[in-house]
Amino acid sequence: METRQQWGTRAGFIFAAVGSAVGLGNIWRFPYTAYENGGGAFFLPYLFALLTTGISLLAFEFALGHRHRGSAPLTFYRISPRAEFIGWWQMCVTFIVSTYYAVIIAWSISYTYFAITGAWGKDTQSFLFKEYLHVADKPGQFGGLVPEVLIPLALVWIIVLGVAFKGVKKGIEVVNRIFIPLLVVMFLIIVVRAVTMEGAMQGLDAFFKPDWSRIFDGKVWLAAYGQIFFSLSLAFGIMITYSSYLPKNSDTTNNAFITGFANSGFELLAGIGVFAALGFMANNMGVPVDKVASAGVGLAFVVFPQIINELPMSPLFGVLFFLSLTVAGITSLISLAEVCFAAVSEKFSLSRQKTIGIMGTLLVLVSLVFATRGGLMFLDVVDYFANNFGLISIALVEVVTIGLILRRLPVYQNHANFVSDIKLGTFWRVSLLVITPLMLGYMLIDGTIQNIQKNYGDYPTEFVVTYGWSIAAAFLIVALIISLKKWNSQIHSDSAKLEKEWKDRGVS
């Protein structure tokens, strides 16, 4: 049986898993999501979602990868040949997410430099959309490449592909062991500075003050589950791939708890830092916090530069903030790319280096679409549909197929319990077989109804159909086509030996 790459240490795996989970969304999505969904009251549904879907699904995916020791497509093939398409579906979504995620990281690198030069000036909104991105007039227009984005984008891909070439132990593990502690230290400095600024308490009060009347609002619970699901890198194939590199005696369930709580801990830290800074800004402007609170690209590249302008030693804190975004983004992008490399290498019997050369070239070329003048609008629509329809559909099919159709959940419960100190029981089974499918199904139906009633972002129908619905459908179609290709005979032999080995150890 072919020797598989392995993590050097358990800590290395945990740093990598946390590095994948902790990304841009922790910093620019979670704080505002919590604030607009009941403030402090939001943490109750958030914690419930973390335990029932977040950690439960994470433990499930860790068990899948650890038992079957393969990329996402190979893992699902070893579960059942009919389920292989799920792994390719994950890879297709991961591929496209990687291409635009790299561009956002490139913006962060640019803004790290702009923090030193003060290039964004006073009108940070005009600078972002007109002077830096040169945003096209209409959705669907490419408008040519933006030169200012190309150099940092090239740097992003050089780093990511360079790390991938070094492999799991010497590349991915080493980088995450450096970057994750660095990220925490940098963000702690930002938070300490933010909470000592005038008006910070006003922002923190807005963030933490509970609105208990919202606790029975279904949209709040939907937001909590959405935040947990998207934040933990679930259904991307990442956690399956990463756990496949674990030694055979690794504690998968404990790793899931550590990863889940570490990710949520960083989200809470980000919320404190962001809203303390927003409180400072609101105080300076003499307006309530709700007038300055925002999320996403606007928070990171418009609001925060405005806040940084008002700070003493503004270049230092600007560099720290945008370098934090860059580091968080890089560790996540490394994990996204690894899903693609592992899947293609195993399916087509290619060396890792050759796979990285081929797939890396494709990733770079497709990412150029999002580095055009129309790239921001393409990014917005593709991101929305890839996440809200691609990933949610995949997760729902994954859980229903393995848990309800194939009825293989007891196999992975026994496997996880065999190698782990924390035992999975009835709560875990109910979470995966009942709560998670119901929530994912509701999210999918609710999102579909909303988008039938009104186009996402008020974009023209043609634009949404072409770059939203069509791309979401293409993920599944491409996955089904790739899954028709047969695996080589060595894969069949290895699969049988691996299953026999686990059964001989008493894990069935």
Image: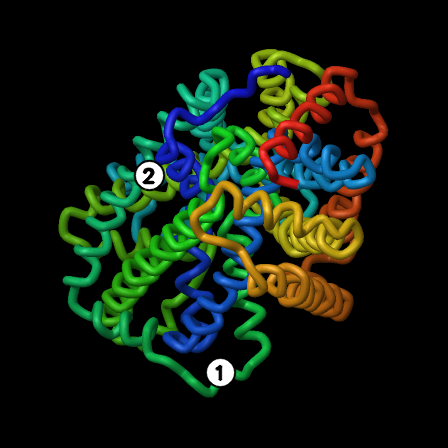
- Residue at 59%, 47% in the rendered image: 414
Q: Quadrant location of residue 271?
A: bottom left
Residue at the limit of the structure toward the bottom, as seen here = 213
Q: Nearer the viewer, residue 320 or 446?
A: 446
Q: Which residue is mark 2?
A: 180
- For label 2, the crowd category at 10 Å Cα-Cα, with few meaning under 14, some 14 to 19 and many 20 or more, is many
Q: Nearer the viewer, residue 396 or 120?
A: 396
- Residue at 64%, 24% in the rendered image: 362
- Amino acid under disc 1: Arg
Q: Position of residue 337 (x, y in %)?
A: 55, 30
Q: Nearer the viewer, residue 335 or 362?
A: 335
User: How many tags in the picture?
Assistant: 2
Q: Is residue 71 above or below residue 290?
A: above
Visual colour scheme: rainbow
- Residue at 45%, 31% in the rendered image: 148
Say which quadrant the N terminus sits in.
top right
| 201 sits to left or right of 443 | left
Q: Position of residue 65 (x, y in %)?
A: 59, 37
- For label 1, the crowd category at 10 Å Cα-Cα, with few meaning under 14, some 14 to 19 and many 20 or more, is some
The answer, for residue 289, to whether it is visible in the render is yes
Q: Is residue 408 above or below residue 77?
A: below
Residue 214, label in figure: 1
The disc, 2 or 1, on the residue closer to the chain's N-terminal end is: 2
Q: Is residue 283 above or below residue 28?
A: below
Q: Position of residue 206 (x, y in %)?
A: 32, 75
